[in-house]
Image: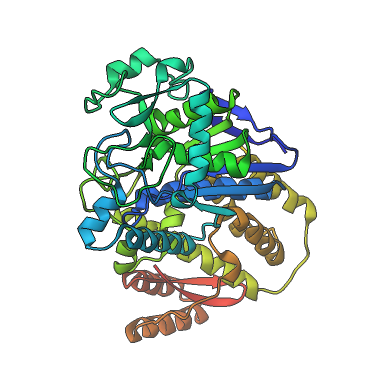
């Protein structure tokens, strides 16, 4: 099956061809564990989960590696500021190790609630320092580094294709640089591979290295751990679009400087989640987490459903109104699935099933067009020319990509107020007397009170709006 993916490197859709037949290696940038993940972060992980599920649906064996940044990520994505873990530890009066483990656990709990399939390999930066040192030594041996002010820098002038992911030249990047002046750097865009001196004094997490006692730069960890577990060539690398100009650009430079060959075949990036006309960010100190949504009465999968409604390469506007609508949509979807389980089995039509299946594959394999796939699921559920068993089977099959937990759907009892119950009884009596005008009037009264009546082959159903 042909899978088309938009490759940030080529700025176009390309047919996916794996490095090894039948297998896909995926590396995704994981959390920096200094605070809870905000819903903007989580949108990216939902998109990456979709990608993984699409590969699996197409029969690929996926090897997914995700890093956990528990050292080295400074408060700037370049080389400025303090380590985010240290900032978190000071904020909460705990050790850097305690902070890292606490927020790592919180992140993966959030991922589980969102039905995100966990990585095959979860690798902590602090447990791969030796791998980073080994990779830096390869880069140094190939002549791409210099030492200045006690730190080891990558010299971007030595790497001719620097900026190819963003489409910007070195001169463009210089002109657009908003980087605090570091007098140790030959070029403002040069970046640190290994720190022995920080602008903010001693770092709690430090290790011995050939360049002195210190700690790694943020960018080197992803290169070192992806190469360790996926090899010198990788099928797919993912992340948010905010990583393109700095983090992923630097990853490419250092990885290809070390190996001397192309590192990643496909780069995929998810767009921002927008709130109040600004991208979701932790920098302001206040942000919306999954727990924020839960505390307001929403289910985690309401947010996943919201994410499915927008293509991963388009911005998604977040509002509680939109989340409310998503929650109602998911509730209606799970209710329809539950009702199908209770309908009598009728004849099956393989040809009609295959038409739906082929459409679904065409959508998900066209650069993860999940919104169209979700709309197709709704078309399927409304198609009364399909048997209940066929609709249920296909819906659960499609959900292996959508990840909404439809297989476990069950009809939940609805608490119907007594006055609504009276109106329902009167409507039933009006219908029995063929008083259709009165039945319609009572139906509208019931809707005004937040409920509706559905007449189904299994009988009358009361649904909360």
**At 50% from the left edge and 27% from the top edge, which residue is drawn?**
139
Viewer-side residue, 423 vs 13: 13
Question: x, y (%) of residue 220?
Answer: 45, 37
Question: x, y (%) of residue 213?
Answer: 36, 42
Question: x, y (%) of residue 320?
Answer: 30, 56
| Image quadrant where residue 464 sits | bottom left
Indicate whether 106 appears above or below 8: below
Question: x, y (%) of residue 37?
Answer: 35, 54
Query: Which part of the image, by quadrant, shows the C terminus?
Result: bottom left
Q: Horizontally, is 135 left or right of 365 in the view?
A: left
**At 33% from the left edge and 23% from the top edge, which residue is drawn?**
189
Query: Which part of the image, by quadrant, shows the N terminus?
Result: top right
Q: Horizontally, is 405 left or right of 212 in the view?
A: right
Indicate whether 441 appears above or below 36: below
Q: Horizontally, is 25 left or right of 269 in the view?
A: right
- Specify whether residue 161 is in view: yes
Indicate whether 29 appears above or below 417: above
């Amino acid at each position: 099956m042909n899978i088309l993916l938009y490759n940030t490197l080529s700025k176009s859709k390309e047919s996916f061809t794996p490095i090894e037949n039948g297998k896909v290696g995926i590396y995704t940038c994981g959390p920096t564990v200094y605070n809870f993940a905000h819903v903007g972060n989580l949108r990216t992980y939902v998109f990456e989960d979709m990608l993984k599920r699409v590969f699996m649906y197409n029969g690929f064996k996926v090897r997914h590696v995700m890093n956990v940044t528990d050292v080295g990520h400074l408060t700037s994505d370049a080389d400025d500021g303090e380590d985010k873990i240290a900032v978190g530890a000071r904020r909460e009066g705990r050790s850097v190790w305690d902070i890292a483990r606490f927020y790592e656990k919180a992140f993966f709990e959030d991922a589980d609630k969102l039905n995100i399939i966990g990585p095959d390999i979860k690798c902590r930066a602090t447990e791969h320092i030796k791998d980073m040192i080994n990779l830096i030594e390869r880069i140094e041996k190939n002549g791409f580094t210099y030492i200045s002010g006690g730190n080891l820098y990558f010299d971007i002038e030595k790497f001719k294709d620097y900026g190819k992911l963003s489409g910007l030249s070195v001169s463009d990047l210089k002109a657009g640089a908003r980087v605090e002046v570091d007098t140790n750097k030959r070029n403002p865009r040069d970046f640190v591979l290994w720190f022995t001196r920080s602008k903010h004094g001693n770092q709690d997490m430090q290790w011995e290295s050939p360049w002195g006692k210190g700690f790694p730069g943020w960018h080197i960890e992803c290169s070192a751990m992806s190469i360790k577990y996926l090899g010198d060539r990788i099928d797919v690398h993912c992340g948010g679009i905010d990583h393109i100009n700095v983090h992923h650009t630097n990853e490419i430079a250092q990885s290809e400087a070390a190996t001397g060959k192309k590192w990643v075949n496909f780069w995929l990036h998810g767009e921002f989640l927008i709130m109040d006309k600004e991208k979701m960010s932790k920098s302001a100190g206040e942000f919306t987490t999954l727990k924020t949504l839960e505390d307001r009465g929403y289910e985690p999968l309401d947010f996943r459903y919201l994410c499915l409604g927008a293509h991963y390469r388009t911005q998604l506007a977040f509002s509680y109104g939109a989340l409310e609508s998503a929650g109602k949509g998911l509730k209606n979807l799970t209710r329809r699935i539950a009702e199908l389980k209770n309908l009598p089995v009728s004849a099956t039509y393989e040809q009609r099933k295959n038409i739906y299946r082929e459409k679904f594959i065409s959508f998900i394999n066209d650069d993860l067009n999940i919104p169209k796939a979700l709309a197709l699921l709704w078309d399927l559920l409304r198609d009364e020319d399909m048997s209940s068993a066929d609709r249920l089977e296909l819906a659960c099959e499609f959900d292996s990509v959508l990840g909404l937990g439809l297989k476990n759907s069950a009809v939940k009892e609805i608490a119907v107020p007594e006055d609504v119950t009276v109106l329902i009884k009167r409507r039933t009596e009006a219908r029995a007397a063929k008083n259709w005008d009165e039945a319609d009037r009572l139906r509208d009264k019931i809707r005004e009170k937040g409920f509706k009546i559905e007449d189904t082959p299994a009988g009358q159903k009361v649904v909360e709006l």
